[in-house]
Image (cartoon, helix red, strand yellow):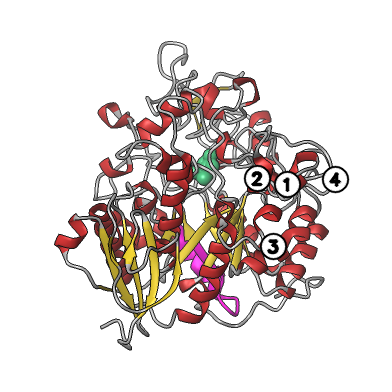
Amino acid sequence: MPHADTPTTIRHDADWWRQAVIYQIYPRSFADSDGDGVGDLPGITSRLHHLAELGVDAVWLSPFYPSQLADGGYDVADHRDVDPRLGTLDDFDAMVAEADRLGLRIMVDIVPNHSSDRHVWFQEALAAAPGSAARARYVFRDGRGPDGELPPTDWPSSFGGPAWTRVPDGQWYLHLYAPQQPDFDWDNPEVREDFHTTLRFWADRGVAGFRVDVAHGLAKDLREPLRDLGEERGYEPDALPLDGSHPLWDRDAVHDVYRGWRRVFDAYDPPRFAVAEAWVRASRRTAYASAEGLGQAFNFDFLGARLDAVELRAVIGSALDDARRAGATSTWVLSNHDVARHVSRYALPPGSAKRDVEEWLLTDGRDPAPDLPSGARKARAAALLMLALPGSAYVYQGEELGLPEVADLDRADLQDPMWVRSGGRVKGRDGCRVPLPWTREGTSFGFGPGGSWLPQPADWGTYAAEAQRGDGDSFLELYRAALRLRRALVTDEALEWACSEEETRRGLLRFARTGGWHTVSNLSDSAVPLPPGEVLLASGPLSGDRLPPWTTAWLRTGAASAR
Ligand code: GLC
């Protein structure tokens, strides 16, 4: 049943998401309408035309719910309301209506693993006695040791430190993230029912889909006695067992939750869509992405890969196979609110891995010195590669402007709990969350009429949308041209490699999509011959019939099909 006041008409194409371009907004950093330095919903509404001009299909909003911002809004105090600093539910409805007018769909972030400790349920749990129904919505346990002074298990928080915090009456509660993010007990039917209500609440307001936070974490093994993790304490997705036997992550029972959600989604016309944030082994992703489950699952292997042709060819191949097995399409992601921006990642020495990026951030981005022009060139080549692949491309706000990571934020300004909880070993994710520049000059470069909650670099205005619009060499115009063409070129979901493994070992990726659309990426330091055909778009200047180093081109060849 549509929400009475929402004039939305979600277009009736149940498969819209399969090859959509979805733009991620981090609401506090997108646009600020009232000058308090924090982005808000009216700010988003006022800038939606930028996204329509960019040519995306949908917008995913990271959390805008009431929150004390212990984890950038992923600590949700009320899953069915808007943080007063960001607006009201009426502002939300106005945003959906404007998006609808512009032909954009809205997706919201659902955070089901935990709430904020300010959530009314957690406040009730604290006030209630051990063993009460109020505590049973969360995971409260007695501690170990003679006086229960030791945490119930050795489980670690993903942000550092133990995953348990003690309350005044001596019990401990579980939080796989910050202490302000108590985990729900998903064996409790009341929790399950409440999230169905939340999903319907947003679907009724015209939301087309959901991004599901920590989708692989809900179903914990909470049978007594709780199991210590011992050697398994370090959580690396690639080391998780393939049989779902880890006590915390990727347990099979989680799919029972999503089968219930699927019934909620399918009661709508068109059915609501969802994408899982599930950091699991590739072969286990299928279950999250299945048609009985959430429908799609993020594949972070592309994001995690180096810009290396052999590695990318393998990642692309297996992502397409996995998605096909699930009956879904793959996702492609280069950046999001949890990782250093890829222009900067690619500006580090070739071969830099996640750990190297973390260490680099700790030097405030000085050592090694990033080669930003090279990073930008590579990011442009990667963008045209990503946008040519079959499946959904997720674009993180500012990526279309070519923003680099702000690596030199002052330690006193850092807000990410990772920084404090890791004891200063991890600088955290603030550097990709710095508010966007919209104008060359002016207060907070057009972000809003006041300042900005994280300081913007002095040269931020050179990246502004205003500075790039109309400049054919800019990032923004490259993304716009690519999205316009993509819309015209995409027909089906087929991809056929058009280069040999040997060529790929030399840095070449070339594939065909149906209709004679070829993509060729030269991920090497030497120019290569450009295949014959009409050049539709290139990530950098071409020199005659050569494809320069670190460049991607889209071509139209005579051949009519991918096969
Ligand atoms: C997800 C979010 C991240 C958040 C965490 C806990 O990984 O993307 O930003 O910190 O969940 O909710």
Q: Which residue is mark 4?
A: 34
How packed is label 3: few (under 14 Cα within 10 Å), some, or many (20 or more)? few
Q: Which labelled disc corresponds to residue 462?
A: 2
> Considering the numbered disc 2 on the image, is that residue within a helix, a strand or a loop?
helix
> Considering the numbered disc 3 on the image, is that residue within a helix, a strand or a loop?
helix
Query: Residue 270 appears in which quarter of the rendering?
Result: bottom right
Say what amino acid the circle numbered 2 marks.
Answer: Thr
Q: In this view, which residue lies farthest toward the left?
A: 502
Say what amino acid the circle numbered 1 marks.
Answer: Arg
Residue depicted at 47% across the width and 23% down the height: 362
From this viewpoint, is residue 317 visible?
Answer: yes
Using the image, determine if residue 57 lies above or below residue 345.
below
Separation (CA) of disc 2 from disc 4? 24 Å
Q: Which residue is mark 1?
A: 440
- The residue mark sitting in front, 3 or 2, is 2
Disc 3 and disc 1 in contact, CB within 8 angstroms: no
Q: Which residue is mark 3?
A: 50
Of the numbered discs 3 and 4, the one sitting upstream in the chain is 4
